[in-house]
Each structure stands twice: as structure tokens, then as C-alpha cells.
Image (spheres, helix red, strand yellow):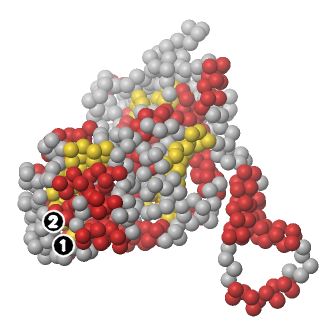
């Protein structure tokens, strides 16, 4: 007996379920469906992505709809157009034997006029994204004042994407006596606030521990240097020859760049992000579902609509800014009871995020090392051997066997095997024998032992932080906030890892914890901004005029690589906060402040970052701007790079 029959579903729904091949309800379906069918009630259902939530609310809402009434009776809100279309298609499949039920998808990127016309023809169920739904309400193109049911799917993700006001406005347009069903993977404060404001005594069901991860997903992290992140991704792909994965990046720009690199290096990959047209996104997803693409590189927003079976790995190329988002990412794999793996490529500066995620998902990560070239070659060799063994022989080649045997005549079985394998395998050998080992990172436990043995890292007196000088400022269209964002993205650091950002006209200062010092120096000194090389050095001044161990003022600026000759024309600051900077070509500091004005105006408050600032001046701030040195020349002012 099909277990769905025990949930109280109608014959027409059971017939559709049989066509779809569903055999047993998932836990969230088993808990939610009987309660929602029994009576009209508000419900909060907490369950991970991929646990069958669409059917959990889809079957009950279809059974409760009056097909003879052409008015809109149910509204389903979802975060993205992909998920909106996916839910719409599934509801249509569930209701295929229900006569007269119409479902309309409402989302951005398509004609709002066509969508309004479809609703006017009679749509008992509307599936919508919050932004487009609010637009249609504002234009008077839809009437949801008489609906009986409102479903919020992936509520936490909708709020995380900034739809709080839209959702509040939409719900305020609906009747007070409707039933509201809220489905979410996690329960952040904003979701709880929505529930408190618009729901009355909701029934709460939880699948697994609240906010926890799926039990079918294992979690691994690989520690690498920031510069080795892409190389690590390739090695992990090579070490898993049958990988069918979603690779997550934080920004659209990184998503496109990583996908293009993978394609150039011979991997079957594609990008999925918000800058693609709907037709392009549909084409990418069609190829991914057809397994023509093995590695789909995606942003979190674009990936919300991904519902593809048998994804083997989720790869966090970069961790999300919001730790809770990790739960949604990992939910792309390990579906329908199958096992999946969530991989995180992490730098030392991000290790603390691993602990934070572990607390949220209530599961432990396993630390692993990036496979060496030799290990990857061995894996690929055995994979190739198994592929040859399992290949079904196409007997159409029988006619060509005499000619083939003639060509291969004289080769022994062992020689023939070696040559066959080498045809496919040589590229791995040739590539990896030339590459360096990137798996030399010490483990977390080894680092802790070393820290205990060697003592804490050396720090200055700037609150235990390292302070840096960098030769970009407001002249490059930065203020303190945009420079902080740029540094975080470029260095791949967390939102709190860059602080005390002080922007001047042609230079700036900022702080990080000492553990990031090597990364800051290595990465930034190899970055160009609009064709001009960025120069970053460690400031010995903590902004408080401290003294060194000899009692001398340490306010003078000294780079971390002071033993090397300075580049001609580069900045050589006297000290942080001094009235002027000098170039190696000019021995005297510039007199006066901005634009050669005299010091008589120095008492007036300066405009920080080009705008009047109400913030108190940070340590080491100056009333004078540095003279433009030869390293800048007279070229047009470079523009700040666009951020996604």
C-alpha cells in the first residue's frame, strides 16, 4: 500500500503521485500534510532544502482549492524566479487530474502584461517572487484581498535577500482570517518576526534539529593559501572524476571568472548568476540537468531555483557572508535519502567560520588535505580502467576489427593496455609532474601545537592589530566604507576582519588582525587598480604616538620590506598623520595642505574621503594631503572597480 494513501489525500492527487513515481512521503510531508488537510490553521515548518517541502504544502493547497471558483484563493511566495517556475511546474504536475485548477507564475524578467492577463483569465493559485508581486499590487493588476491561503517558501532566504518590506506589504494586503504556512530551513529573527506579526497560534513542525544540516550530507574543509584557491578547486574536481556539483561563489564577478577559467582548463562548467538573461539561465540549467555540465558555478541567489537530482558535491569556493546561507548551499546535495558531500575551500583567516557553521548545523567538519599530483594520477588511472571495463561494446565496430588488428599487430596485451590508458591519461601525468604541491598547509591541531610552542604572534600596540599604509584613497573614488568593501573582496576576508579604515586623498590606512598580515602583504602588493600597481606596507605607527624600546618616537613610517630598495617615485611617508609625504626624488616635505593652500586654513575641519564626515577623526588623521608623486603621474583619475 502506498503510504501517501494514509495521509488523507484525494484519489486524483494519489493518481498524480503514482505517475510521478513517489513511493513514500518524506518526514516533512508525513508531518505537515495530515495537519494541513484536517483544518485551516497557521503552520511553521522547519526543514532543510531538498526534503520535499513543495509537496508538503502543494498537495494540501490543491485539495483545498475550489476549482469552480475562478478567483485567486492561494498565494505562494518564493525567493527567485527559478524556484517560482519550479514550484509552478510541480503544482501543475500534482494537479494534472484536478479539472479547472489554474496556476500562474509571477516573476521578474517576463512580461508583466502577459502575467496579468493570465491571472485575469482565472488563476486559483499564484506562485510569485515578492518583488514582482508587489509591483503588480501597486499597479492594481492582481487582487489577493480574498485569498484563503498564503504560503511562504524558503522564508529565511527571501528575508536574507532583502524582501522583508515587500513581504510585509504583501501580507498586509491579504485578509486576516487566511491560513499562513511558513516553510523555512532556518529560523532567524526576521522570520520569527513575520510569524509573530501575521500568524495566530501556528502549529510548528521541525524535521531534524532546528536549523540543523541534513544527516545525508558530510562536511569537509580544505585549508589553502588564498592564491591557491582555484588550483585547489581543480584538484578536488580531478580527485572526484564523477563529480556532478554546484560550486558557490559570493559575487557574480567571481562566479563568471571561475567558470571561464574552468572552461579554459578543459572542464565541463558554466556560470549561473543574475547578469544572465532568462533564456541564458534556462539554457544553462537545461544543460546541467542533462549532465552536459559537471560543475555549475553559481551565486547563492541564482542557485535558489536549483532542484536537480543526484548532485554529488557542493563546493564552497568562497564561504557566504551570512553563515546561515551555508545550510541552503549544502542542501543542494544529499537529497532523497542519497549521500552527498559539502566541501569548503578555506583560508586561515576563515577558519573561525567553520566553528560557527558547526554550531549552526550541529555537525562536525572533517579537515582534509588537498590531494597531491601523485594521488590524483592514481585516482584517474583507476577510474579510467573501470571506465574501460564497464564500457558496453558497440558491435558496429566489428566490421573495422580486421583493419584495427592489423594496425595493432605485434603488441602484447600489457603493451596494448599501457598505450590505451596513456592516450587518456598522459595529460594528467604531464600536468601534475610540473605542478607544485599545495597540500603543505599544517592542520588545525598542528598549528595549535606550534602556537603553544612558539608563543603568540608578535603584535604592535594598536589594540593587538596590524596597521597598514596603502597608496589608494579618495582620489580613486573610495570612501572608508567602499575601501573596506574593496579590501574585504580582494583579500577574501570576513566583514569584521578589516577595520579602522582611514581614507585620505591619495593614500589610506587600515587594520587587520596580525594573522592576516602575510596575506595582506602578498595579495595587495600583486594587485593592480585600473592599471596602477597597489603598494601596501606595514605602518609602525599605531596612531597613538607610542615610543619604541629605546624611547624614540616610532611614528616614522617603515615598510615591512625596508631592506629592499624602494621603487623610484613611490610613496615614502615620513609618518602616519604627518603633514606631507615625500618621494625619493624630493627630499623636502610639501608645505601647506590640499591644493598648495597655506597652513592658515589647516584649523578648519577637512572633508574625509571627499565628503563632510560627522564621524570623529581616526588616529593619525591629518589636515594635509600628500603631494602627488611620480608613481601617479598626470593620468586621468582611475575609477573604482564595480562591485557585484
Please name the residue that numbered disc 1 is placed on.
Answer: 101
**Viewer-closest of 404 and 624:** 404
User: Residue at left 24%, top 50%?
Assistant: 182
Judged left or right of residue 218, residue 431 is right
Determine crowd level at label 2: few under 14, some 14-19, many 20+ residues with C-alpha closer than 10 A: some
Mark 2 to mark 1: distance in Å? 8 Å
Q: Position of residue 525 (x, y in %)?
A: 58, 40
Q: Is residue 210 above or below residue 514?
A: below
Q: Residue at x 87, y 68 (%)?
A: 414
Residue of label 2: 65
Residue 355 in sight: yes
Q: Is residue 323 visible?
A: no
Q: Are marks 2 and 1 in contact (CB under 8 Å)?
A: yes
Vertical placement of residue 342 versus 84, above or below: above
Q: Quadrant of the N terminus?
A: bottom left
The quadrant in which residue 63 appears is bottom left
Few, some or many residues within 10 Å of mark 1 (<14, 14–19, 20+): many
Amino acid at each position: 500500500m502506498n503510504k501517501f494513501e494514509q495521509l488523507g489525500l484525494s484519489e486524483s492527487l494519489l493518481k498524480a503521485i503514482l505517475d510521478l513515481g513517489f513511493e513514500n512521503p518524506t518526514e516533512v510531508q508525513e508531518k505537515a500534510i495530515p495537519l494541513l488537510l484536517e483544518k485551516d490553521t497557521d503552520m511553521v515548518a522547519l526543514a532543510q532544502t531538498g526534503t520535499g517541502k513543495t509537496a508538503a504544502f502543494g498537495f494540501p493547497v490543491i485539495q483545498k482549492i475550489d476549482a469552480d471558483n475562478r478567483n485567486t484563493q492561494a498565494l505562494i511566495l518564493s525567493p527567485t524566479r527559478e524556484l517560482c517556475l519550479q514550484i509552478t511546474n510541480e503544482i501543475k504536475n500534482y494537479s494534472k487530474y484536478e479539472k479547472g485548477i489554474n496556476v500562474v507564475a509571477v516573476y521578474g524578467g517576463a512580461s508583466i502584461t502577459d502575467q496579468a492577463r493570465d491571472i485575469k483569465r482565472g488563476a486559483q493559485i499564484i506562485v510569485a517572487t515578492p518583488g514582482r508581486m508587489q509591483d503588480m499590487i501597486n499597479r492594481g493588476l492582481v487582487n489577493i484581498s480574498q485569498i484563503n491561503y498564503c504560503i511562504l517558501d524558503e522564508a529565511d532566504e527571501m528575508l536574507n535577500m532583502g524582501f522583508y518590506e515587500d513581504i510585509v506589504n504583501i501580507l498586509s494586503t491579504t485578509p486576516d482570517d487566511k491560513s499562513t504556512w511558513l516553510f523555512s530551513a532556518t529560523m532567524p529573527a526576521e522570520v520569527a518576526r513575520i510569524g509573530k506579526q501575521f500568524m495566530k497560534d501556528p502549529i510548528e513542525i521541525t524535521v531534524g534539529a532546528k536549523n540543523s544540516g541534513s544527516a545525508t550530507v558530510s562536511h569537509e574543509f580544505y585549508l589553502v593559501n588564498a592564491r591557491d584557491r582555484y588550483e585547489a578547486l581543480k584538484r578536488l574536481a580531478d580527485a572526484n572524476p564523477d563529480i556532478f556539483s554546484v560550486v558557490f561563489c559570493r559575487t557574480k564577478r567571481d562566479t563568471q571568472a571561475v567558470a571561464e577559467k574552468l572552461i579554459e582548463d578543459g572542464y565541463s562548467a558554466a556560470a549561473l548568476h543574475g547578469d544572465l538573461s532568462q533564456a541564458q539561465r534556462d539554457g544553462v540549467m537545461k544543460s546541467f540537468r542533462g549532465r552536459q555540465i559537471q560543475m555549475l558555478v553559481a551565486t547563492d541567489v541564482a542557485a535558489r531555483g536549483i532542484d536537480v537530482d543526484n548532485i554529488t558535491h557542493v563546493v564552497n569556493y568562497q564561504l557566504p557572508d551570512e553563515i546561515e546561507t551555508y545550510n541552503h548551499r549544502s542542501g543542494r546535495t544529499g537529497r532523497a535519502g542519497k549521500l552527498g558531500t559539502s566541501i569548503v575551500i578555506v583560508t586561515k583567516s576563515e577558519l573561525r567560520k567553520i566553528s560557527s557553521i558547526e554550531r549552526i548545523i550541529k555537525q562536525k567538519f572533517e579537515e582534509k588535505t588537498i590531494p597531491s599530483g601523485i594521488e590524483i594520477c592514481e585516482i584517474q588511472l583507476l577510474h579510467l580502467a573501470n571506465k574501460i571495463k564497464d564500457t558496453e561494446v558497440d558491435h558496429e565496430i566489428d566490421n573495422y576489427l580486421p583493419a584495427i588488428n592489423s594496425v595493432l599487430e605485434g603488441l602484447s596485451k600489457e603493451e596494448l593496455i599501457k598505450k590505451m590508458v596513456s592516450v587518456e591519461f598522459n595529460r594528467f601525468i604531464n600536468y601534475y609532474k610540473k605542478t607544485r604541491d599545495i597540500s603543505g598547509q599544517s592542520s588545525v591541531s598542528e598549528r595549535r601545537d606550534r602556537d603553544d610552542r612558539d608563543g603568540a604572534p608578535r603584535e604592535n600596540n594598536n589594540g593587538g592589530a596590524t596597521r597598514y599604509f596603502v597608496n589608494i584613497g579618495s582620489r580613486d573614488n573610495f570612501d572608508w566604507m567602499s575601501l573596506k568593501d574593496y579590501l574585504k573582496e580582494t583579500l577574501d576576508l570576513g566583514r569584521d576582519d578589516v577595520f579602522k579604515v582611514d581614507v585620505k586623498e591619495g593614500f589610506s590606512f587600515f587594520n587587520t588582525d596580525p594573522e592576516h598580515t602575510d596575506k595582506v602583504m602578498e595579495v595587495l602588493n600583486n594587485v593592480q587598480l585600473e592599471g596602477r600597481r597597489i603598494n601596501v606596507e606595514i605602518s609602525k605607527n599605531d596612531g597613538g604616538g607610542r615610543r619604541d624600546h629605546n624611547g624614540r618616537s616610532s611614528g616614522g613610517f617603515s615598510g615591512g620590506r625596508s631592506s629592499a630598495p624602494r621603487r623610484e617615485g613611490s610613496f615614502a611617508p615620513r609618518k602616519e598623520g604627518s603633514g606631507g609625504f615625500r618621494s625619493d626624488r624630493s627630499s623636502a616635505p610639501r608645505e601647506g595642505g590640499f591644493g598648495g593652500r597655506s597652513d592658515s586654513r589647516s584649523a578648519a575641519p577637512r572633508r574625509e574621503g571627499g565628503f563632510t564626515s560627522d564621524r570623529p577623526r581616526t588616529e593619525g588623521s591629518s589636515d594635509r594631503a600628500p603631494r602627488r608623486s611620480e608613481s601617479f603621474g598626470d593620468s586621468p583619475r582611475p575609477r573604482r572597480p564595480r562591485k557585484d
